[in-house]
Image (tube, rainbow, N blue to C red):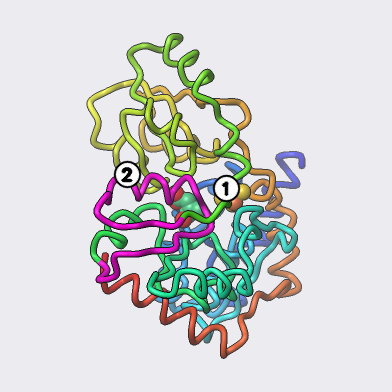
Amino acid sequence: MSSETLSQTLAEIEELKKKHQAIILAHNYQNDEIQDLADFVGDSLALSQKAAQTDAKVIVFCGVHFMAESAAILAPDKTVLLPAPDAGCPMADMAEPEEVLEWRKRYPNAAVVAYVNSSAAVKSVSDYCCTSANAVKLVRNIPESEIIFLPDQNLGRFVAQQVPEKTIHLWPGYCITHHRITPEEVIKIKNLYPQAEVLVHPECRHEVTALADFVGSTSQIIQYVRQSQSSEFIIGTEMGIIHSLTKENPSKRFYLMSPGLICPNMKQTTVAKVLDSLRHLKPVITVEPQIREKAVAALNRMLKYV
Ligand code: CIZ
Ligand code: SF4
């Protein structure tokens, strides 16, 4: 898109936002230009909460499908649009509600903790939801001592290390983007930038998180950098986060841990698709009322313990 076309498109987006009382929410992993045009940038829970609290009638959710579903669960009276309707999450697809029910039979005393990266249907057959920012705290605080953690085995393993007093059954899912990083890559980049602090997401493998100075969600990594005295950081999560980090900390330097840290689904949202979704008020993401009711209960149970 030429810069003239881009500014025309942005002007039209602004006009349509006013006309439809819409706000644009973008995940930390979105393309830079999407983060720049958004009203709020954040992690999936913060964005869903924003969706629930805002006076806007239309939410344009720049992210992947399960995130727009979470917004629809928490803001059922609003129209939630997902400009990139094919943007799914391969990890969320690694758990189906029928399988969860089978695991429940296998471990009848276990509580099911579902990472937000799961479908509304999976959340509806789970006891609690969690995010990567609060998974450890939630698992530690809930009364149950036996837990089925799904779908991310890496986040589950990280939680199990921090909460050794509980028995955690790990679902075999993983994020194709984070799971790909190898410890060899981390060692190589650490040798290149020996002064840098290493910050990684808990969706990375255990062998990778073991080499980090800090393990946290996107919001926690952003907060860590804000407070740190260091001037260089190696970042082990999806590359989109570098945009906010650089904007907020122009004098600090950021090195992406691996060139493979790119989520193709997150990158499906474009400025043209945002415009299109506001023009046609489509595609709308909805959640069936029976599923929504149970999923919202799992989300609310999370809020009680974190
Ligand atoms: O919950 C989110 O937004 C995800 C998927 C990652 C993170 O760490 O924020
Ligand atoms: Fe899913 Fe991984 Fe992409 Fe997040 S980064 S949306 S977990 S595939």
Q: Determine which quarter of the picture holds residue 201.
A: top left
Residue at 34%, 64% in the rendered image? 146
Q: Secondary structure at mark 1?
A: loop
Q: Is residue 78 left or right of residue 55?
A: right
Residue at 42%, 15% in the rendered image? 190
> Which residue occupies the extreme bottom position in the image?
290
Spatial CA distance of label 2 from label 1 is 17 Å
The residue labelled by disc 2 is 161
Q: Secondary structure at mark 2?
A: helix
Kindly identify which numbered label has been placed on residue 97.
Answer: none
- On the image, the x and y values in percent for residue 233 come to 38, 24
Residue at 36%, 28% in the rendered image? 212
Q: Is residue 134 left or right of residue 294?
A: left
> Which residue occupies the extreme front position in the image?
106
Amino acid residing under circle 1: Tyr
- On the image, the x and y values in percent for residue 269 come to 68, 53
- On the image, the x and y values in percent for residue 96 come to 63, 68
Residue at 30%, 43% in the rendered image? 223
Instruction: State which mark lies toward you, 2 or 1.
Output: 2
Are there few (<14), some (14-19), or many (20+) residues within 10 Å of tag 1?
Answer: many
Magenta span covers which residues?
142-169
Amino acid residing under circle 2: Gln
Q: Quadrant of the C terminus?
A: bottom left
Counting residues from the start of the chain, the first of labels 2 and 1 encountered is 2
Residue 167 among those drawn in magenta: yes
The residue labelled by disc 1 is 174
Q: Quadrant of the N terminus?
A: top right
Q: Is residue 219 left or right of residue 30?
A: left
Are there few (<14), some (14-19), or many (20+) residues within 10 Å of tag 2?
Answer: some
